Image (cartoon, rainbow, N blue to C red):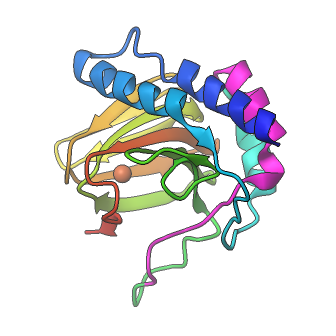
């Protein structure tokens, strides 16, 4: 398992390669890449409660833009600790069956790194991830699925392979269409304050 995790960290670092990204995203990608490269396997890691998104994850990986990353993720698919972290709100649907997150590198992950969080966001087809924000600076890179990415000022269809940078506390939302969305996220800065719906 340790070697599979190290292979994954290497594939994540390669996928975070900043070449070809806009300057602000490239700087953040380089920062996160250093975090991925320095991650170490946590001995005796005990994962928390997990949701079963095996089928959705497998379907999303079919459309992965990086074959190396897809291979590394498939190798650890059974160990993926999917969760949905937002508290329930009155009158809002339960989104935990359609939106999930899995932290791969970070203070609480199987691959330990103290100052960044790198993980996956997974969304079922035809799902809305409502406007939310967080103090952490966030870089997303799309692995699979074309979806709409929104801020109060913009809306863009991002294909696999593209990246988007969310500065600290910028509101943002996503909407998937016919394909599941799988995207790599990287957090830096205040990585301890959780995200919240607006
Ligand atoms: Fe975010």
Residue name at image x 32 percent, y 19 percent: 26
Q: Residue furthest top?
A: 20
- Is residue 60 found inside the magenta-colored segment of the image? no
For the question of whether residue 72 can be seen, the reply is yes
Tell which of 135 and 141 is nearer to you: 135
- For residue 1, what is the image quadrant? top right
Rendering coords of residue 22 (x, y %): 28, 16
> Split into 4 quadrants, where in the image is the C terminus?
bottom left
Relative horizontal placement of residue 170, taking residue 81 as reference (left or right): left
How many tags in the picture? 0
For the question of whether residue 62 can be seen, the reply is no
Relative horizontal placement of residue 113, taking residue 179 as reference (left or right): left
Q: Is residue 26 above or below residue 196?
A: above
- For residue 74, what is the image quadrant? top right
Rendering coords of residue 6 (x, y %): 70, 32
Q: Which residues are magenta?
A: 65-88
């Amino acid at each position: 398992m340790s070697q599979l995790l190290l292979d994954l960290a290497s594939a994540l670092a390669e996928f975070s390669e900043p070449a070809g990204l806009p300057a602000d995203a490239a700087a953040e990608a380089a920062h996160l890449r250093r975090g991925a490269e320095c991650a170490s396997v946590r001995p005796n890691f005990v994962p928390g409660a997990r949701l079963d998104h095996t089928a959705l994850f497998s379907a999303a990986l079919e459309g992965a833009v990086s074959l190396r990353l897809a291979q590394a993720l498939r190798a650890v698919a059974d160990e993926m600790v999917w969760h949905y972290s937002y508290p329930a709100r009155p009158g809002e649907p339960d989104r935990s069956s359609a939106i999930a997150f899995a932290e791969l590198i970070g203070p609480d992950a199987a691959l330990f790194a103290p100052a960044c969080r790198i993980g996956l966001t997974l969304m079922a087809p035809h799902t809305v991830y409502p406007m939310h924000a967080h103090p952490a600076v966030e870089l997303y890179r799309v692995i699979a699925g074309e979806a709409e990415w929104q801020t109060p000022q913009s809306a863009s269809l991002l294909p696999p392979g593209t990246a988007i940078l969310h500065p600290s506390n910028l509101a943002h939302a996503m909407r998937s269409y016919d394909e599941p969305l799988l995207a790599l996220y990287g957090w830096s800065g205040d990585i301890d304050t959780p995200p919240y719906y607006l």
